[in-house]
Amino acid sequence: MGRRSSVRIAKDRLKVLVVSDRMKCKPEACERITRELFQVLSKYIEITPEEFDVSYSRTHVHIRLTGEEQ
Amino acid sequence: MGEVIVITSGKGGVGKTTTTANIGAGLSMLDKKVIIIDTDLGLRNLDVVMGLENFIVYNLVDVIEGKCRLKQALIRDKRYENLYLLPSAQTKDKTAVSPGQMKKLTSELKETYDYILLDCPAGIEQGFQNAIAGADRAVVVTTPEVSAIRDADRIVGLLEAEKIGKIELIINRIRMDMVKRGDMMSVDDVTEILSVPLIGAIPDDEQVVIGTNQGEPVISMESRAGEAYRNICRRITGEEVPFLDLEAGSGLWSRLTHIFHKN
């Protein structure tokens, strides 16, 4: 089981490509957006990074807070 | 009133033309009146895939420029009832037709045909803009590869921006042996990334190559890819058809064992 499945690699690469295409920015910028959104929200809401997720669709930025659900 | 469907992909070589030919033939087999239009100006292909290259007299640009009547340019496919091809021009460049002209042409065709299928050129330039101008609906073709999926995502974004009502996905050339090994993205992997409703998945099938060699759409051949295309055609007409189990072998036993293993 030494080899990492090439599908895993493909999906990881695609996620970065697709998000930066959709947002029309570099992948690093998307990571910063995600990080800063977390910082802003955590000023007002008590959340941990595990409870927080940002995803980018073609028309929306989805911010998901799992909070007490888990 | 007919429906205009553009078959597009962004990336070249993923099977747009083959898909157009097969869906065209398949819809006519379902007793629909169908016209397939090659909108790739300068690189005419659809006629060759259909095996109709020797019957071309006039083309799309001749019709648009008024050099002939529409009927004179149409090639009726003798093998399929109610299937017509409007070939592209081999010599003109992509600026010979405008989006407005395409829109006018397709809206006229809607009065006569049930389905107007547009084989879109690769890329996102004017040829693409022409092909989507009058489209009510889009079928985006991709293969399970990083570059093809990335381009498909761009295309879907552009189609959404153009307010194309219905956008559906075909995943072409799936090899289940590779999917099982973890070396090819599965149908679920691809739809998860693109988040576009799936209208069909086509197994990598050598019958497609054989069909293309002969100018014979695989849909009328006994084959897995043909079966997948036949299902796609029924889904296009609104019928609910369960998705093919691409893993199933040809024998009944392997299909049965697969059903038991699944759950």
Image: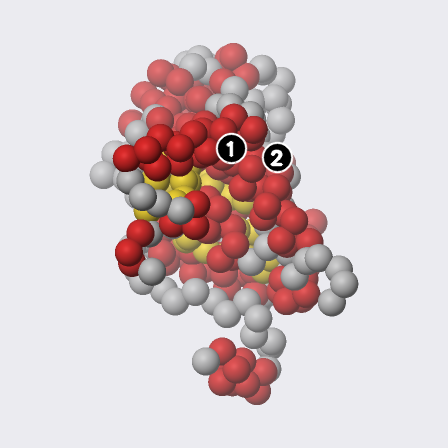
Q: Which of B241 and B189 lies nearest the eye of the viewer?
A: B189
Residue B222 location, x and y as percent?
57, 67
Question: Label 2: which residue?
Answer: B12
* Depth check, front residue: B154 or B159: B154
Residue B182: give x, y in percent of width and height: 65, 61
Q: Nearer the viewer, mark 1 or mark 2?
A: 1
Q: Residue at x 43, y 14 (%)?
A: B98
Q: Secondary structure at mark 1?
A: helix
Q: Is residue B98 above or below residue B55?
A: above
Residue A15, by quadrant, is top right
Chain of the residue on which disc 2 is drawn: B
Q: Amino acid at mark 1?
A: Glu
Residue drawn at x 35%, y 30% is A40
* Residue B263 visible in rendering: yes
Determine which quarter of the picture holds residue B183.
bottom right
In percent of the image, x 32 and y 33: which residue is there?
A43
**Quarter of the rendering occupied by the N terminus of chain B:** top left
Q: Which residue is rendered at x = 60% and y = 29% of the image? A: B44
Q: Nearer the viewer, residue B207 or B228?
A: B228
- Residue that carries the numbered disc 1 in the rendered image: A31
Mark 2: few/some/many CA within 10 Å (<14, 14-19, 20+): some
- The quarter of the rendered structure image containing the C terminus of chain B is bottom left
Q: Please state which of residues B222 and B167 is positioned toward the viewer in this rendering.
A: B167
* Residue B86 appears in the rendering: no
Q: Disc 2 residue type? A: Gly
**Image label count:** 2
